Image (cartoon, grey):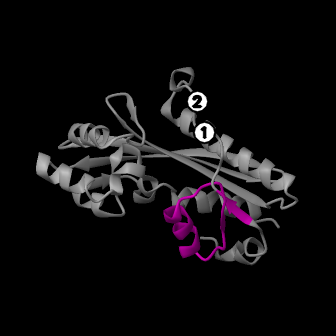
Amino acid sequence: MLQPVMHVLKQKNIILASGSPRRKELIENIGLKVGLCPSLFEENLDLKSFKSFSEFVEETALQKALEVENRLIGQGKAPDIVIGADTMVTLDGEMFGKPTTKADAFQMLSRLSGRGHTVYTGVVVKAKNETVKFTEKTDVIFGKLNEDQINGYIATGESMDKAGGYGIQGVGGTFVERVEGDYFTVVGLPLYRLCAVLYDMHKHL
């Protein structure tokens, strides 16, 4: 999709406001160079003050991008494009963030077992003269899990830094019976929408 504008994008200093090697790999797999700059934004927005999960993840992604952009400008390293993203897992109208303890991870995975849940990823693409925000959501259906399977997974350590307590691109993917929507939304960066935005931003340059 980006081939017609790749010559323009390859000259840009693109920064991902994240410490996620998974998101970096997704962008590099499509041929773009991107720098990682984990945001220092304290993710403390109140979900109750937003009308929807989509608004919440978009605002979190925006604040991550703004913090990184302002910090880099202050260091004299102004980026051309900053990409911010925020992913959340939801079930029964509740948000599942990253587990804080192994017991927390166990409770999350037990609730997800044998059921479908929805993953939201909000993305902000911030260029010097334009900011685009969007959210993608994908339904993920887990197979039925027993206690030994959940505890065995938690013991791998993979669940502790992932929203909802699992990573679909790792061992956690073995729990997933099926995905309805964009798989990359669950990984943490919806590639199709991201590329569509980057293309629209640069097609006339």
> Are the residues tagged 2 and 1 within 8 Å (C-beta)?
yes
Q: Quadrant of the N terminus?
A: bottom right
Q: Quadrant of residue 201?
A: bottom right
Which label was assigned to residue 60? 1
Amino acid type, label 2 = Leu
Q: Quadrant of the C terminus?
A: bottom right
Which segment did they paint magenta? Answer: 14-37
Residue furthest out toward the right: 76
Residue 195 vs 154, above or below: the answer is below
Write down the residue under mark 2: 45
**Position of residue 98 measured from the top left corner of the image (x, y, whole percent):** 42, 43
Q: Does 143 lie within the magenta span?
A: no
Within 10 angstroms of label 1, few (less than 14), some, or many (20 or more) residues?
Answer: many
Q: Is tag 2's residue or tag 1's residue first in the polypeptide sequence?
A: 2
Please name whichever residue, 101 or 73, is drawn nearer the observer in this view of the structure.
101
Q: What's the CA distance linking mark 2 and mark 1?
A: 7 Å
